[in-house]
Amino acid sequence: MYFHPYVQIKNLLLEGAEREIWVAGWVRTKRETKELAFLELNDGSCQKNLQLVVDRNEWSAVLTGVSTGASVRAKGSLRPSPAPGQKWELAVVALEVVGPADPQTYPLQKKRHSYEFLREIAHLRPRTNTFSALARVRNTLAFSIHEFFQNHGYVWVNTPLITASDAEGAGQMFRVTTLDVEKPPRTPEGQVDWSKDFFGKEAHLTVSGQLNGETFATSLGAIYTFGPTFRAENSNTTRHLAEFWMVEPETAWLDLAGNMDLAEDFLKFLVTKILEKNIEELTFFDQWVEKGLLETLNSVAYGNFSKITYTQAVAELQKSKKDFEYPVTWGNDLQSEHERYLTDEVYKGPVIVTNYPKEIKAFYMKLNGDGKTVKAMDVLVPRLGEIIGGSEREERLDVLEDRMNELKMPLESYSWYLDLRRFGSVPHSGFGLGFERLLQYVTGMGNIRDVIPFPRTVGSADF
Ligand code: 4AD
Ligand code: MG
């Protein structure tokens, strides 16, 4: 039977029973009085440290090796702490430094470090309060995503990361090749001969699992994907990564209204779960990162999302006296300044915008009766703008083919996708939630580079 090598501090503090026990972790701080040394020990299992109370005379030799960042093991009895600040403490009877950390060179000293600096030491930043809290919230969200869809009878489908199709038709893909970039094979016309490449054709990293997801939704009924996706967007912003995680449910027989309900219930469920399981972390973020975060999360969990059409959004924006950098005209995509005006100032909460002009949305979205707009939906949230993009899908073969021809897409290479409309076609809908954008939203973190363990962005793929 498996047990952790050491009781996790989280459980120790939860149980709080007076007993003698071994603990292990990393020292956050050391404070000394004449007789005693107080070590704050963190083992990563929770936000709280365990205070170790050590007799200075007895342990002076070992204590000289104890500094911020050192790993230690200690034995002692857990007892109620007489001092304010913690309920329990460990009266140490044995202490051992396992791995010292030289105070001259260990980069994480007891002070606030900037996020920029911590990005340069991404291998050590999970040892800070902020980044260990982020890892635990991220973990709860990932688990709860599965929980939500499993509760609703959805099947998790693993779609490929290497693909020959561009799911969004936006041409922002990373090439996957084993050809010699110096001397690629050429066709008689002098073009690169991709038929000689590893897959016998051009291949890329996927921007979305949706198209493959649709094949399973139109056979299993309700599915979701959850995995990494890649975009070679040259956007150096606080909301864009080149490698990010996406959750994409796809549901047969579901219309746009149902898809909106699914997105709303899904987000509310996730927020409720972290409020239940990560209140310590969220309280920390509320205090240090984004004041009012807990209030916002509660209002998201228990309030209703506003719902407007793109046309209404444009009217709302035009009516405002705001001096936007990008002018607002019907037909142009909403910029993040527009999205944020709607969420932060007009509706003061999440907003679902529907029925965008077809020209600014992907080829697979279902055309409305007006011939101009599609059954698209974007979920916008305060501070960030879009965190979900989705739609009802075009299930009519002729309408879809017309649209793809308009966009000059090579129909042959999408013939498998069109087969879903040729044989037993059904109305269906889905959406994609950007996992890191969600994390930014629920923690208040300003930069998306800080909510993924090792960010990949334009000009940067360290660690
Ligand atoms: O709106 P997008 O491009 O939609 C799709 O990919 C659809 N195939 C989804 C679907 O209907 N199944 O992307 C979905 C979400 C965005 O709303 C955003 O939250 C996130 O993915 N996203 C990014 N997150 C981080 N970095 C980037 N570069 C992102 N691009 C999109
Ligand atoms: Mg989008």
Image (cartoon, rainbow, N blue to C red):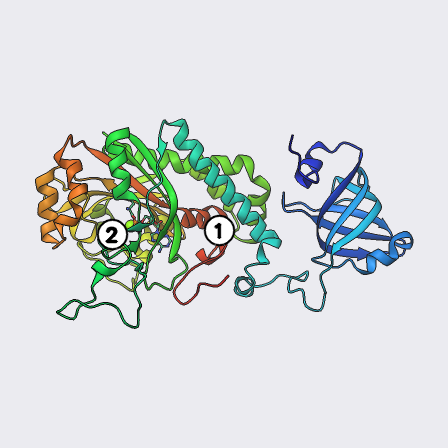
Sequence-first tag of 2 and 1:
2
Query: Mark 2 or 1, which is nearer the eye?
Result: 2
Inspect the image, locate mark 1, and give the three-letter code of the amino acid beneath it. Gly
Residue 11 left/right relative to 83: left
Closer-to-camera residue (406/418): 418
* Residue at the (73%, 50%) spot, across then down: 40
The percent position of residue 380, horizontal first and vertical second, equals 34, 47
Q: Where is mark 1, residue-wise?
A: 444
Q: Residue 426: x percent and y percent?
A: 18, 31
* Left or right of 247 on screen, residue 360: left
Q: Give the image location of residue 249, x and y in percent.
A: 32, 37
CA separation, marks 2 and 1?
Answer: 37 Å
* Quarter of the N terminus within the rendering: top right
* 233 over 431 or under it: above or below: below
Q: Residue at left 48%, top 51%?
A: 444
Residue lying furthest right: 57
Task: Judge from the rendering whether residue 139 lies leftward or rightward of residue 101; answer left or right.
Answer: left
Q: Residue at x 10, y 45 (%)?
A: 401
For the residue labelled by badge 1, is the local secondary structure a helix, a strand or a loop? loop
Q: Amino acid at mark 2?
A: Ala
Q: Nearer the viewer, residue 415 or 321?
A: 415
Q: Is residue 128 above or below residue 212?
A: below
- In the rendered structure, find residue 426 and report the number of the disc placed on it: none
